Image (tube, rainbow, N blue to C red):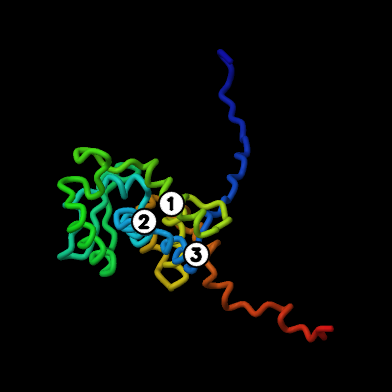
Amino acid sequence: MLKREKFFFEIPRPKKKLILPNVLSISQVEKLFSQLENLKHKTMLFLAYSGGLRVSEVVNLKIKDIHSARMVINIKGAKGKKDRMVALSEGILELLRKYYIAYKPTYWLFEGQYKDEPYSTRSLQQIFHRAKNEAKITQDVTFHSLRHSYATHLHERGTDIKLIQELLGHNDLKTTLRYTHVSTRKLETIVNPFDQLKIKDE
């Protein structure tokens, strides 16, 4: 390569696969949540779905991150070391108050085996999978699917994609646009040609 003129090769980059997220329907979320009886487990999973939170974000929440006066949840040091805010639902605030009275956490919102440590991500994932199996949900979904479902359900209800991007804390809009591919918002407007066929049912 020495003492030769500079040269450049145009090498085409391989296209990245578009992998669509696995999403639960509203009825499946309801069925999964109905399997939860323990107040702490219920609060963690309900909170995850209502704010589109990652499992690590749920277990790392501190009491001071819940801002009831402004009705927001402050997510500190999330993926990419970014802070963000998500809306706090009225129903979740009521549930959090019941949880607080019952468990009396001191620093971490969801304490682990010992009061000075947060709840384990692995334990929380196991709670999700147990509820999923009890609800007889056969799709290949994980705890993270609650976040995917939250974003998709927002889109299906007409929420602007840029706002969804902000709520999820995505740097690139392309990441958020994946949810438009699994949303049924546009599909529901389509009249399937099969349903217009006049076929005798014999």
Q: Which residue is mark 1?
A: 128
N-term-proximal mark, 1 vs 3: 3
Task: Tell me the number on the disc at residue 187.
Answer: none
Task: Where is residue 69? Give x, y as percent.
Answer: 15, 65
* Crowd tier of the residue under label 3, counting other residues whose Cα lies within 10 Å: few below 14, some 14–19, many 20 or above: some
Pointers 2 and 1 in contact (CB under 8 A)? yes
Does dot 1 land on a helix, a strand or a loop?
A: helix
Q: Residue furthest top?
A: 2
Q: Work out whether residue 39 can be spotted.
A: yes
- Horizontal placement of 191 versus 160: left or right? right
Cα distance between the residues tagged 2 and 1 = 8 Å
Which corner quadrant of the image does residue 184 belong to? Answer: bottom right
The residue beneath circle 2 is 45
Marks 1 and 3 sit apart, C-alpha to C-alpha, by: 13 Å
Quarter of the image with the C terminus is bottom right
Check disc 2 and give the amino acid type.
Leu
- Residue 102: image x %, image y %? 20, 56
Residue nearest the viewer, comparing 31 with 139: 31
- Of labels 2 and 1, earlier in sequence is 2
**Alpha carbon distance from label 3 to label 2:** 14 Å
Q: Are marks 1 and 3 in contact (CB under 8 Å)?
A: no
Residue at 61%, 44% in the rendered image: 15
Residue for point 18% across, 59% down: 67
Question: Quick check: 5 above or below 59?
Answer: above
In the rendered view, tell whether residue 35 sits above or below residue 61: below
> What residue does disc 3 label?
28
Q: Quadrant of residue 86?
A: bottom left
